[in-house]
Amino acid sequence: MAKKKNTQAANLGSVPAKPVANIQKQQPASRGKNAGGENTGAPGRYREALVVGGIAVVTFLFFRACLDNKLTNWDDLGYIISNPLIKDSSWQGIKNIFSISHPVMGNYHPFTILLYNIEYSYQGLQPWIYHFDSVLLHVLCTIAVYFFIKVLSRRTVAAAVVALLFGLHPMHVESVAWAAGRKDVLYGMFFVLSCTAYIYYLRAVGSKKTVWYITCLLLFALSLLAKSVAVTLPVTLFVIDYYEKRKLGWGLLIEKLPHFGLALLFGILSVMAQKDIGALGSLDAHFNFIERIALGGYALCNYLWKVIVPTGLSNFYPYPLKIGDALPVSYYIYPVIIIGLAFAVWRFARHNRAVIFGLSFFIINIFLLLQFIPVGGAIISDRYGYIPYIGLFFLLGWFVSGFFEAKEKIPTGKVVLGITIAYCLALGYLTNERCKDWYDSVTLWKDDIEKHPDAPVGYFYLGQEYFTRYEGATSANEKKIMGDSSLLCFNMSIARKPDYINPIICVAELQRNYGLLDDARNTYYRALKINDKNESVYLGLGVVYSIKKQFDSAAFCFRKALSLKPFFPEGYSNYANFLDITGNADSSMIEYATAIAQNPDAYIPYMNRARILIRRGKIDDAMKDLNRAADISPETGEVYYLRAKCYAQKGNKTLALQDVQKATSLGYTQVDQNFVQQLK
């Protein structure tokens, strides 16, 4: 009867039992091969380069559709379009990026913001640069995953399978196709590289050991600076220790104290940033502790299912609606399923080091994202599986590569590998199709509504996009279509959640634009009953009262809005306009300057400030503002008409007439015909 130890060794395949330092004391490996039996000669290197290059090219090709995509209104506004931190490349601007007092949308990830800053300095808000860099980073991360698994397992086939799955899986589309998802691919790349450096540290001898340790720590720091979810790395390193058969002891913990120190620091910063915008605790009023356990089980089961069958993907997965203030009973089944799966692993695979490594890697890196501590309004997110899925991919990679460890199994292994590659290519097709859903805000939210027709979020964001197009429409017909479409979407959102304040505010803004001032005021007050601390409500009321010439009420509302949100470029712009029409041009100029400083990519403050400069006879300064406004919004006819007035005052009738004609072609109708005759 074979001993239990031998039985375990058979299950483990070629998991390294000792560090390289000990292996070197044994017989030297055959020439051209390493201690793990891999071919390291020139043919082997060329073959590996071909494999890695092929995976990189295939990954890029299946994500190629992303390069045609636009920026969306799903966090791209906060991270890129309206983010002042990426628009200031001065030394002070860079310091602001790394300052803990400047989190972006409740997150502290300065390295990610710095990369946006560099992209903006070269290409402004051109979407292609952000998408291209995200795809490129994903390809680089895929290559990093290959070498991580190769170094860890010493199996080329395992590394290739894991890297191919990582590169082509549809669950990774959100992290790549979404410009605001950049933090996932950036932190992920440094996370994987840090894990790889740690393995080299374990197997190194002499001074190289220190070099690899420092490298691991520095890469971890970069990962944290990209996204604080990397705090799980120190625990992940223990899983690598387990795989490498290191004995558990205080030494393992002590060597990771610097890692835990960094993790603790960034964990505190992350919680502070989330608390600052109220993201944490948003779930507490809705779900108790037991219900959160059930929801965590549901989320975990979904991640496990979608890694195999990635269908029904969405950018937003809403929490379930309660029935009679109680979570549906069906959700309590999921923790039972998880317990059953855990028992099966313990019963049949607890001695299989590769299986335990893969599952532990997954669980450790997904655990904080299971909403036991509520963050945001989605129960699961595709992007949360970006790094955790490496553990699950490892299980398949290890299984397939096992056929190539024995010569007699290689023919079967080739068949299994072929099936695996076909499966990966099928995933690649789904990835390519999923990239198209992220083309723009309309395609994204229509897809979400199709999958979650009872949730209010998709209708709101789709309505918001239509409202943006309504504001930019140049023809009456287009304006009516976009306005009616946005109103329909907002009302459908409100019907699904009557206390959802955002679509209510947007309905009020539409009513204001339609000239229904009393209706708009009443709708704003409806929103005020839901949240009397909302700056947008006071801003809207300020505009309504200003139009109705109730200037005292307007002034109070504008100031209240700015006191609630000091960083509010739209608020300062509207307040500046109010000051101008009430005869306070000097104060208006100050507020316009603040609006422009906070958001230099909004054309309205430049255009309205130019009006004041024209009245004051400062034509050259007005021209600078109008030129900037035209660069930002080349489809706004009013900008060209105002610039025509400037050209006329400077005596250049030819250019003035050209701008008048340009304004007319863009649908601007308030053209003074006497002024036109003077130019001819």
Image (cartoon, rainbow, N blue to C red):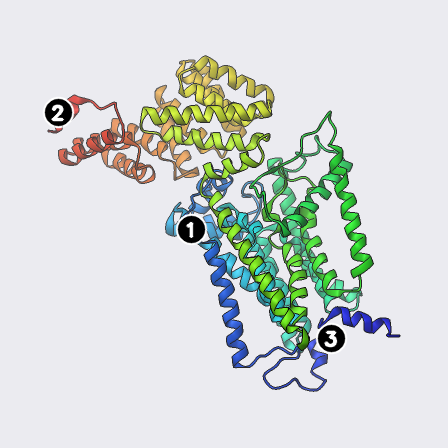
Residue type at numbered disc 3 = Lys
The furthest residue to the right: 1
* Vertical side of 359 occupied by 445: above or below: above
Q: Circle 3 is placed at which residue position? A: 18
In terms of sequence position, does the residue under pointer 2 or pointer 1 come before the other? 1
* Front in this rendered view, residue 192 or 558: 192
| Disc 2 from disc 1: Cα separation | 47 Å
* Vertical side of 540 occupied by 119: above or below: below
Tell me the crowding category of disc 2: few under 14, some 14 to 19, or many 20 or more residues within 10 angstroms, Cα based.
few
* Residue beneath the point at 39% across and 39% down: 600
Residue type at numbered disc 2 = Gln
Q: Quadrant of the C terminus?
A: top left
Q: Position of residue 636 (x, y in %)?
A: 30, 32
- Image marks 2 and 1: residues in contact by CB distance under 8 Å: no
Q: Is residue 4 visible?
A: yes
* Vertical side of 20 occupied by 340: above or below: above
* Residue beneath the point at 70% across and 64% down: 240
Q: Circle 2 is placed at which residue position? A: 677
Q: Circle 1 is placed at which residue position? A: 67
| Disc 3 from disc 1: Cα separation | 46 Å
SS for dot 3 = loop
Q: Position of residue 128 (x, y in %)?
A: 40, 49
